[in-house]
Structures are given as C-alpha cells and as structure tokens.
Amino acid sequence: MTIKCEKCPLRGLPLFLEFGREELDFMQKFKTGEMQAEPGTHLLSQGEKSPQLFTVLSGMGLKYKMLRNGSRQVVGFVMPGDFLGLQAGVMGEMGHSVEAVTEMTLCVFNRTAIWELFSAHPERSFAIAHLAAVEEHFLGDALATVGQRPAYEKIAWAMARFFNRAKATGQAVKNTARLPFRQQDLADGLGLSLVHTNKQLAALRRDGVLSWQNGTLTVHDSKALGQIAGEESEVHRRPLI
C-alpha cells in the first residue's frame, strides 16, 4: 500500500530538513506511486532517458559508470532518502547507472512534472538546488580522498561516511549498521585493488577500529575512526524530495 507523503517514515529523521504544508501537498501530487525492486534491478541506465524520478524509501543501491574499455567506476552508494534520476530529468539522459543491491522501495515521480515544480514551487526548486550542492560537496570530498589520501584513510573515510549516514537515517543500532555491499564495490569506488582493500580492512580490524563481516559494519572505536576519517566523513542535513 502506497505511503502518503505526510506519513513518510523518513520525514522525521534528523538528516532531513522540514518542509511546509503547501510543499507537502505538492509532493503528494508529484508522487505517482511506489516501486519495489529486487537486488540486481537496474533502476536507471547510463546513456538512457527515464520517464521517472525516484526517492529511495528503503534499501540500498549502487551508482556506477562504465568506461569504453569495459572497466567500472563506482561513483556512489545509494541509501534511503537519496533522490535519483535528476540528471535525466534536466540533461535528458543519465551519465551513470543505478542498480539495486538489496530489496528496495522507491517513491516514483513523473519526470515531466519537474518543470511545474521549478515554475510554481520555488521552495521545492531550492530544495533540489540544495541537494545538488550537497552532492557536489560530497564529490569534492570523495575526489580529494581518492586522489590524495593513503589507502588506510580512504577505507576509514568510506566506512565513517556509511556509518554516519546510517545513524542519521535510523539504520544504525548502537555501534553496528547494515552494509550489504561487496568489497569489490568499495574497491571500485576508492580506486583500489580488491587485494589492497582487503588488507586495509584487515588492518583496521587489527587496530580495533572497525570490522565489516557478513554485510554488517561494526565500529569498535568511533573516536579513532573519526580521527582517521577526518571531517570530510561527516554528513550534512539535506532536503527530502
């Protein structure tokens, strides 16, 4: 059964900014339904148009870009509250693909209605600009981490990002959070080999900082993780579309 926007389980979480009654009413009209996706489902495909936009209600996914030589670059990890498909909505086609890693529930929006949002609802238009700014900020932190930090710090940064996001969206229980991605996904996102990624995870476990096993991330020393990861691992409050 489709969840009404006013009863959205994400709205009250600390990660997301509040929005007014008028905005809420518009979002209910903007939303056309919900979609269930099984693991492995391609939600959006690189180079293709999409008639729909999505907000992740639950579950996790992966953003990646395929290069001409067949290699894959992971460009993001999808978590609840993420807004997907804006590239296609504005630029006409996607520059990367989005795949479900777990079972996912997504709110579905009609892409053509985005122009009504821009023209008639400036508060929601600013929310989309805000989301784009948050994404740009994250990509700057990610590029600096991938390009300039040693592998040990790269892994710590990524794990701190995951855990901080899980806490902010109510998915962390004490010092543990579900992290259903593969080590290969992490390696592809950080520009590391699978072997090197495995060695650095083992070093973080040996140092008593964290462990990642059977799809669960456990942070043993949050202070140490924060010091290694740095302030770039913090998550910023954002609008919910």
Image (cartoon, rainbow, N blue to C red):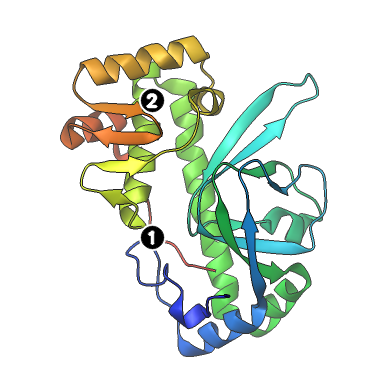
Q: Position of residue 14 (x, y in %)?
A: 32, 64
Dot 2 amino acid type: Ile
Dot 1 amino acid type: Arg
Q: Is residue 58 above or below residue 217?
A: below
Seen at 29% across and 26% down, the residue is: 211
- Kindly report which numbered mark, 2 or 1, lies closer to the viewer in this rendering: 2
Residue 183 is tagged as: none
Seen at 47% across and 44% down, the residue is: 138
Q: Position of residue 120 (x, y in %)?
A: 67, 85
Task: Using the rendered image of the protein, determine whether residue 233 is visible from the camera's viewpoint.
Answer: no
Marks 2 and 1, the one that precedes in the sequence = 2
Disc 2 element:
helix
- Is residue 40 found left or right of 131 in the rendered image? right
Q: Position of residue 38 (x, y in %)?
A: 62, 48
Q: Is residue 164 above or below residue 58?
A: above
- Is residue 209 found left or right of 196 in the rendered image? left
- The quarter in which the C terminus is drawn is bottom right
- The quarter in which the N terminus is drawn is bottom right
Q: Which residue is mark 2?
A: 155
Res 20 quadrant in image: bottom left
Residue 237 is tagged as: 1
Seen at 47% across and 10% down, the residue is: 195
Task: Using the rendered image of the protein, determine whether residue 53 is visible from the camera's viewpoint.
Answer: yes
- Binning the other alpha carbons within 10 Å of mark 2 as few (below 14), some (14 to 19) or many (20 upward) gives many
Seen at 30% across and 49% down, the residue is: 172
